[in-house]
Image: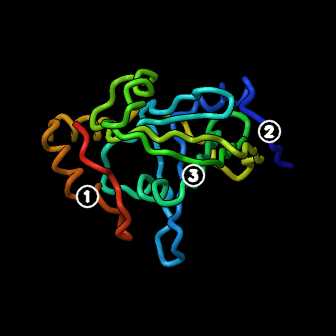
């Protein structure tokens, strides 16, 4: 049976910090819009306090998470134990998008290591913390971080990443506003 928590406990914080992969889910208000689920990795997430997490959002092929959060703020992050004891943790709450031109970006950015192509920081103010068994989640062994994104970013350079943001990060696939302006 799943358990609901009032805040992130030390045990839950440790579990989150150990994960190499997590998923974020968002949806637009329109029932004709596309629901988005996106995997995240690259040591991009930080627990800020007992009710807040944040992750670095790097340039990608779309901007759904940013667009949906800007439209309605709904965000869920899900963590699965792929090694050891089965466990799933979901954090529901109000997301916010902090772009590089925003006043609080430098303060939040200081919590993270350098990653190429950072276009924003996604912060989640957690309203609901719940676990579930995860009995059907298969066991996987972590082999390492892929170097594809780093190679891609190195090849494009800052100007190429900016051009990519202009081409595919200013609006969602449903036409919702994305980035206010390209980063970098």
Q: Using a 10 Å C-alpha cutoff, classify the residue at mark 1 as few (fewer than 14 neighbours), some (14 to 19) or many (20 or more).
A: some
Camera-side residue of 118 and 89: 118
Find the residue positioned furthest to the right. Answer: 1
The circle on residue 55 is none
Colour scheme of this structure image? rainbow
Q: Earlier in the sequence, mark 1 or mark 3?
A: 3
Q: Earlier in the sequence, mark 3 or mark 2?
A: 2
Cα distance in 3D space between marks 1 and 2: 38 Å
Camera-side residue of 92 and 16: 92
Q: Which residue is mark 2?
A: 5
Q: Which residue is mark 1?
A: 168
Q: Secondary structure at mark 3?
A: strand
Contact, mark 1 vs mark 2 (Cβ under 8 Å)? no
Residue at the image point whose x is 18% and y is 34% from the top: 154
Q: Using a 10 Å C-alpha cutoff, classify the residue at mark 3 as few (fewer than 14 neighbours), some (14 to 19) or many (20 or more).
A: many
Corner quadrant of residue 58: top left
Return the x and y of residue 50 as percentages of the image width and height: 68, 29
The circle on residue 75 is 3
Return the x and y of residue 101 as percentages of the image width and height: 31, 37
User: Is 119 situated above or below 35?
Assistant: above
Return the x and y of residue 161 as percentages of the image width and height: 20, 43
Q: Secondary structure at mark 2?
A: strand
Residue at the image point whose x is 14% and y is 44% from the top: 160
Residue at the image point whose x is 36% and y is 40% from the top: 99
Residue at the image point whose x is 75% and y is 45% from the top: 130
């Amino acid at each position: 049976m799943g358990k609901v928590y009032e805040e992130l406990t030390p045990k839950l914080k440790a579990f989150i910090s150990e994960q190499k992969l997590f998923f974020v889910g968002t949806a637009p208000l329109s029932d004709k819009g596309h629901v988005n689920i996106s995997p995240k990795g690259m040591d991009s997430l930080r627990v800020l306090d007992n009710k807040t997490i944040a992750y670095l959002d790097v340039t990608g092929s779309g901007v759904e998470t940013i667009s949906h959060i800007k439209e309605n703020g709904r965000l869920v992050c899900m963590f699965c134990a792929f090694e050891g004891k089965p466990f799933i943790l979901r954090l529901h709450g109000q997301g916010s998008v902090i772009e590089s031109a925003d006043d609080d970006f430098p303060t939040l950015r200081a919590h993270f290591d350098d990653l190429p192509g950072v276009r924003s920081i996604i912060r989640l103010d957690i309203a609901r913390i719940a676990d579930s068994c995860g009995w059907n989640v298969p066991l996987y062994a972590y082999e390492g971080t892929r170097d594809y994104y780093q190679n891609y970013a190195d090849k494009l350079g800052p100007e190429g990443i900016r051009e990519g943001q202009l081409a595919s990060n200013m609006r969602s696939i449903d036409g919702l506003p994305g980035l206010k302006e390209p980063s970098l």
